[in-house]
Image: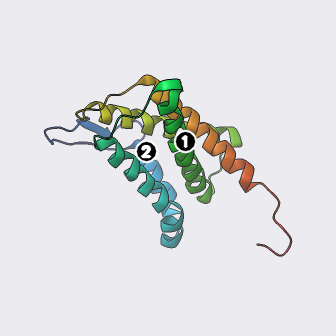
Amino acid sequence: MDFLGAASIRIEPKEAPFRLINLELLVLLNLMIKKMKLYDFLWYWLPTLAYCIVIFSLSSSKIAPIPSFFGVDKVIHGIEYTVLGLLLARSIISSKPKFSKETLILLIVTLGTLYGIFDEVHQSFVPGRSSSHWDVLADGFGSLIGVLFYLKISRRPRASGQR
């Protein structure tokens, strides 16, 4: 047990990039889920988790090289993580946390960037793929754009007659 009361587990597969997974984020997610109904969890969190799996699976495959002229690959990373930032914002805000707007933005950007780091480390173990700290920067920036965009569109006044 560590200072947050979360347990750590060991994973022993031969090619696992991480030998130790700390469960603090899973404990936080578990606490948020306990306050939600199953339908709400499936409606708000399942798309986010599915999208993370899509990112992971795309990083696991050796794909045709993306042209890196003019930073095209960084733009793709930014777009990919803008969607993740949108989904994370939708999921976390649906659990009605008592965070300030600034804390919420920081949390979502941190989670998006941490997933970007995880993705880049994972990618470094895939034959034919490489990792880059610039990709992580594009991932974090994309998460920021995603959460800001979500906050902007979720605050718009709705037309009369809509709920």
Q: Is residue 114 above or below residue 28?
A: above
In this view, which residue lies farthest toward the bottom?
161
Q: Which residue is mark 1?
A: 79
Nearer to me, 33 or 81: 81
Residue at mark 1 to residue at mark 2: CA–CA distance: 24 Å
Q: Position of residue 37 (x, y in %)?
A: 52, 70
Residue ID at (61%, 37%): 144
Residue kind at label 2, given as amino acid type: Leu
Give the residue drawn at x 32%, y 28%.
130
Up/down of 119 relative to 44, above or below: above
The picture places residue 69, in percent across and down from the top left corner, at 48, 25
- Mark 2, residue position: 25
**Do tag 1 and tag 2 residues touch (Cβ < 8 Å)?**
no
Q: Secondary structure at mark 1?
A: helix
Asked if residue 158 shows in the view, the reply is yes
Task: Write the residue at 52% across / 67% down.
Answer: 43
Relative to residue 160, is residue 89 depicted above or below?
Answer: above
User: Would you identify the image quadrant in which residue 143 lies?
Assistant: top right
Residue 56 picture location, percent across and down: 35, 46
- Residue 112, position as x, y percentages in the image: 50, 40
Residue 59's quadrant in the figure? Answer: top left
Image depth: mark 1 or mark 2 in front: 1
Crowding near pointer 1: few (<14 within 10 Å), some, many (20+)?
A: some
**Sequence-wise first label, 1 or 2:** 2
